[in-house]
Amino acid sequence: MGQLLPRDVLFAAGGDVLAKYQTLVKRNWPADRHGEDLRETYSRAGLATSVAYISPGVLGVLNYGANMSRVEWAPDPVTALVQQYLLLEPAATNVVLQNRDLTNAAWTKTSCTPAKDQIGVDGTANGASSLVATAGNATCLQAITLASSQRFQTAYVKRLIGSGEVDMTTDGGTTWTNITSGLSATLWTRISIPAQTLANPSVGFRLVTNGDKIAVDFVQNETGSFQTSVIATTTAAVTRNVDAFSVPFYVAPQTMAPAWAYTRWLERGGQAGSPGNSFLWQIGNAFQNGRLILDEGSNFVTAYHQPAGQSVASQFAVSATVGQVVEALLLFFADGSVQGRASINGGADIIGTRSAGTTNPVFTMWNPLTMFFCQGSTPPPMALSRCLVGMGGGTVVNTIADARGIL
């Protein structure tokens, strides 16, 4: 294998890049190859949040204005460090009203007393609520009128008094999920319960023991099988809009091949998306007309190359759970074929079969000359550690280990 040289790395993007170079995208292309034009485009209508440092040493919920890129701080299960990730998510809607104020009439309380008297996860004084049970099996519920769909329920919860059972529900108490083991007396913890498909969810909490008291913030119920970043609500449901992140990509396929693309991300549930429609990224976006794709739908990782009228793929099973680090390496060869590899939490490579080559034409110019992140009809949420694209696939880079230390 040849030696990897700086000129072989075309560009890098992600949270690791931000940490090292103080920019989300680092380019290595010279000016005569449009290097000066390699500036990312980021947009998102409206407000959004991420988990970040809200004061020295304190992680909480941080608010971002429209068109501000989001950085999420989260523990890395491989390095054991809390580190930065570029947070990219599809649109989501929180249907829970007054999701920080359980004193509001939108919440029906039985044998419990609410107060809006807690420092919120975002550090706001009296931004969150408390619930104290005045009898056993106290409940606080909100009924929501909604057509049948798969619902995912989360909330930030903290124990204040007592040690009895605490439960959470999506279906009005037909099913109670015991969340006691996940509660801390000192820290906010975002708790989730299993997804359910139902109409008219009724969400909330039960305190089994009289006198027990909990704090609650950012109750969230959204479509799907995984959580996304918290969305604050008051009198109406609120939608957080999609993050759009892209980078110009001027190197033609016939010029760059053989090439490689290494991507490292914190799994957020994107594997639940549909295969062939949950793109971590794509260079070009025209169907079978000049694009290269890395997809993670339906517990598979798939590498695609699609020149005019053709599609070849290397697909293989990868079952990552939320919170694990996934690495994927896409190899792109001079005959138009592709091969994928993946690793979970730094483990051994899971190797896909190299696809057939493409013919007549072997290559089509990327259409358009842009690399897009989190794409497809079911775009995956993504906490991006880093993505690098370089030359020398199959020569200077063959395995994930070859690319893992490059930045």
Image (cartoon, rainbow, N blue to C red):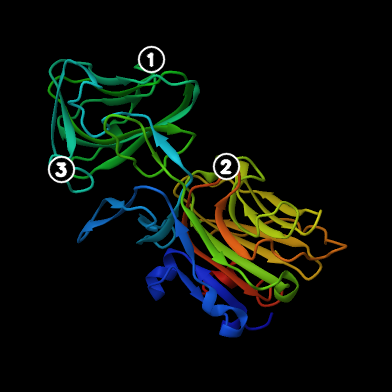
* Picture mark count: 3
Quadrant of the image occupied by residue 389: bottom right
User: Which of the two marks, 3 or 2, is nearer to us in this view?
Assistant: 2
In percent of the image, x 57 and y 50: which residue is there?
A: 375
At label 3, the amino acid type is Ile
Please name the residue shown 58% across and 71% down the image: 403
SS of the residue under disc 3: loop
Residue 284 visible in the snapshot: yes
The percent coordinates of residue 380 (x first, y second) are 53, 47
Which residue is under mark 2?
378
Q: Which residue is mark 3?
A: 119
Please tell me which residue lies in front, 322 or 95. 95
Is disc 3 in contact with disc 2, using a CB cutoff of under 8 Å? no
Q: Secondary structure at mark 1?
A: loop
Q: Nearer the viewer, residue 367 or 333?
A: 367
Residue lying farthest to the right in this orientation: 360
Mark 1 vs mark 2, foreground winner is: 2
- The amino acid type of the residue labelled 1 equals Thr
Which amino acid is tagged 2?
Thr
